[in-house]
Image: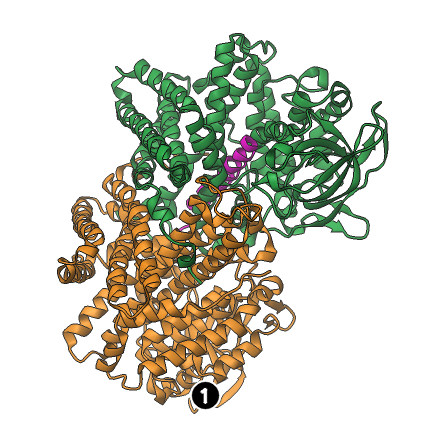
Chain colours: A green, B orange
Amino acid sequence: MPASYKAPLTDLRFALYDVLGVEPLFQRLGYTDATRDILDAVLDEAARFTETVLAPLNSVGDEIGSQLDKATGEVTTPPGFKAAYAQFVEGGWTGLTASPELGGQGLPHTMGVPLNELVNASNLAWGNFPLLSHGAVEALKHHGEAWQQEIFLKPLVEGRWTGTMCLTEPHCGTDLGLLKTKAEPNADGSYAITGTKIFITAGEHDLTDNIVHLVLAKLPDAPPGAKGISLFVTPKFKVARDGTVGERNALSCGSIEHKMGIKASVTCVMNFDGAQGYLVGQPHKGLQAMFTMMNTARLGVGLQGIGLSERAYQNALRYARERLQTRSLSGAKFPDKPADPILVHPDVRRMLLTVKSLVEGSRLLALHAGTLIDIANHAENPTERERADTLVSFLTPISKACQTEWGIENTYHALQCFGGHGYIHEHGMEQLARDARITTLYEGTTGIQALDLMGRKTAATQAAGLKLFLADVHAFVQQHKDDASLTEFIDPLQQKAAEWAGLTKNILQRAAANPEEIGAASTDYLFYSGYVVLAYWWARSVAAAAASPHGDAFKQAKRETARFYFARILPRTLSHAAAIESGADTLMAMDDARFGD
Amino acid sequence: MPASYKAPLTDLRFALYDVLGVEPLFQRLGYTDATRDILDAVLDEAARFTETVLAPLNSVGDEIGSQLDKATGEVTTPPGFKAAYAQFVEGGWTGLTASPELGGQGLPHTMGVPLNELVNASNLAWGNFPLLSHGAVEALKHHGEAWQQEIFLKPLVEGRWTGTMCLTEPHCGTDLGLLKTKAEPNADGSYAITGTKIFITAGEHDLTDNIVHLVLAKLPDAPPGAKGISLFVTPKFKVARDGTVGERNALSCGSIEHKMGIKASVTCVMNFDGAQGYLVGQPHKGLQAMFTMMNTARLGVGLQGIGLSERAYQNALRYARERLQTRSLSGAKFPDKPADPILVHPDVRRMLLTVKSLVEGSRLLALHAGTLIDIANHAENPTERERADTLVSFLTPISKACQTEWGIENTYHALQCFGGHGYIHEHGMEQLARDARITTLYEGTTGIQALDLMGRKTAATQAAGLKLFLADVHAFVQQHKDDASLTEFIDPLQQKAAEWAGLTKNILQRAAANPEEIGAASTDYLFYSGYVVLAYWWARSVAAAAASPHGDAFKQAKRETARFYFARILPRTLSHAAAIESGADTLMAMDDARFGD
């Protein structure tokens, strides 16, 4: 049977209400309608929709995939996808956190986080269709001219149109300074966009009447490199300045990629042949505008890792309870059955608890980032806004990269719990693993996130984000330092926080003499950071559970999972710290030729 | 373009001749024909065959897969597979290490190791067809009656027939005591086998005229559980005691599995409907006979991890040299090009060096195991034979599990070096990753290997295998303790060897009080062991390279890779040691219900 899914509402509510305290937060930020009953109703309805509409389409999407008709350039999504999208639009989900004047529901940004987790868990490939609209909205909202906002925002927010991000070209992905797509001015103030873009998610599909491409291209007078890139809004069907939708624009999907997973997600080669586009923002400042989209998208991709992990966990747990195989080493636990369920075996428990502790910890990392975006946008105090902005910038690469890397690890463990059966298509576990594999690649690979964390967010800011995070840790420690029931978590957390600061200082010192030290430390530093961040959230979870109205079993489960995390996962920091401290020499010494023939 | 492949002959020769010293060893063991020129010719010819015949069929096999005609029960392998198999047989490769009286080439077992690495690297799915014949030969050679050996061994050795291992049933894989397949005596001394087996690799195909199934089943008077299992040889076409091949036996392939990878490898549901089989070995002693097959097969699967890793490395390295993207953080390295090749970036180097150090280290672990099998079979001195047997038993689960887990890690890194392009089918990297995913599952999952290592090979023997390995380490250290150029490797190796002994002692002490400690420590202990074993081989590699006729660039590459390994990979032992020392409590405390709904 295909992988089943049930939205983890209890844990989401615990994270939102008991750990993060979003009820008073939302009120303080002016979201007066975002009361507990409204939030609960949103979660319930999101669970119903994703469990019953999206989740059953997940294996269908994998088996049939999206298909391109080369003759017409039209893409057909798998059966059920279009109807599900119509229901999603009908339910107002595309604009859940957008402002009512744009046709949105006006809920806090934070509430988009659980929605995205649920969508991604139930159907990652489907979720990629609405995903990038959100980024397009952000880019147009912050950088578009008034008339562009007027014309494009409402259809995007309401989901009648979807958006794309057209960055990558065959010869450039990370290094957008190399891009070749050209934008030449037309007489009417628009631009003619010409070039080839690749890896364009949802570049073509049959879910909506129009598709809004946000395209990076170079103006004729562009300075070379990354400082000469401009952003253009270029719809599939032309849109006049008065909003009238006209003829087909000169752009088309040339082919779609055959991928390891997310087979229903359409990954297009897009050909622009003098397509009509409008400049968004200032000439040559396109990259900054695109970063607005990218940060949102990165946090969104991080949620894909959590969603897949949660679904993988649920299925592995079910299998571990049902599958009878051998006896417990400490004596039969179910002597009336032919063998014990494999959940009795410590190594199976190790795998499941690894997933559980990483998923529940990650969920707080992601939701916390959501609250920081709300604070950065809506707090009255500008210092508080700036603080939240700095902190979420720091946490974004950690969230994106760790949650997706853990997504790969978690789907690995869950598949492994199934033994050979995990490798067979029908159980759905191998699809989760294949789908997860894209998440550490798109929207910036893990290596790119690590460089962003270590370079832009740490070295370039004298570790401003880290200092804010460590201040939060310190405040938590101070608040609970007399609670003996938390000592087992607080002591190692404090120790790791101090170690983290020390490692950072050492790296920055070494980097002053040799800039390669930044790249050499980056990925190990990223993981190190992720594990300490989760230790903080696990300590806070135990404290919050104790103070919550939840029952003893829930509190006990949080404490036991936290104990597992501190005993078995947090020690991964030891090897990352050792790798960091070993410096750049062992990486840089080898001459290119000596790597091999 | 699909993933290319070139057999790593230089490194294989270094490992065989310079590190392991197989030339004098083979002579000492009586393989007088196994001279350097013969061995070199075998390696050259194996390279030519695998590079030119098997490697080009790898992507074909993935795209087309093997197909079952449900009406006839016949399986058609992908185009080219049958012709390649005929060439393999023609070249005498199936019997490379078998004795000449059985139609083999009479080379040492060790020489099968590079052959299998090359076959697996070039085409893993294809390699699964001949793979299990070797195990069938071993089982029949050691446990079969003389007439069975007479009839079955030669066709298997010569590759005219292939073998299978029919163990798993729908409700039992690890726990074979639960199996239901029945064997009822016929009047002529044969048995009627009835039952359903699943996951039967190469259970049906079109490569050979006959297929020899070795089937586990229960006799009518079988005691319950694992002590009541017998082994039967059950060919696809009946074979009379005089060797005459007769009619179709009452067995057939009911369906083939749809898998994540190795799509050309046929994974069959086999239905036995009173099929004629002959008892192999003693009644109820089938599991012991099957273990003979399994140990061979486990080492063979370990080589799959190495082969896939090597191919992944070669392609990632080529891509890292060709792909131009951004500049080195320490300044442009190729200012005349539009950007630097990504090989300049420390994080890309980290990924490549991780793969390189794990592959080259694993190669020695695997080849060493090969030499131990030759010593165990052919040394004059019985003490030496027994020592080699104990040591290879200890190293088998480490070799199988670590090499396959590293295979997954290595194909992960190599794919990651390609960025988004790695996720696209046409580059072949995602196939390597999907193919690798089976290797930690079949022939005993990693968790099962870990239990074998920790329980049967360590706790049950008072760590006999470990003591022998540590004695080898000690001898090496003594031999080189005055060589200052090796101190940087010898010191940490010594320290880790002592730590390994201490950890083992602690686990066994805790296990005396609580048997769950065995399972709780097992997987972390397995990885810990694997990393220390590789540290030993890296230290020996540096020493052997220095004393070898290889050029300075080769010696330097070995030293630099070893330095990377000691600085960046060996520290993984820190987190595994911490997890081991944390004991079983955090795994066992959680009540089943608290794992989740």
Q: Is residue B297 left or right of residue A150?
A: left
Would residue B196 be seen by someone viewing this image from the given angle? no
The residue identified by callout 1 is B240
Residue A335 place in picture, x, y as percent: 32, 48
Secondary structure mainly formed by the magenta segment: helix
> What residue is rendered at 40% in x and 40% in y?
A516
Residue segment shown in magenta: A298-324
Asked where in the image residue B222 lies, by quadrant, the reply is bottom left
Instruction: Name the side, left or right, on which A222 lies relative to A404.
Output: right
Location of residue B79 by image quarter: bottom right
> Relative to residue B456, is residue B370 depicted above or below?
below
User: Residue B197 location, x and y as percent?
Assistant: 47, 65
Near-viewer residue (B394 or B193): B394
Q: Residue at x 80, y 30 (%)?
A: A190
The quadrant of the rendering that contains the N terminus of chain B is bottom right
Three-letter amino acid code at disc 1? Ala
Give neighbour class at mark 1: few <14, some 14-19, many 20+ (Cα, 10 Å): few
Residue A249 covered by magenta stretch: no
Q: Which residue is depicted at the point 52% across and 62% down?
A: B262
Which type of secondary structure does the marked residue at label 1 adopt?
Answer: loop
Q: Nearer the viewer, residue B120 or B171?
A: B120
Chain at numbered mark 1: B
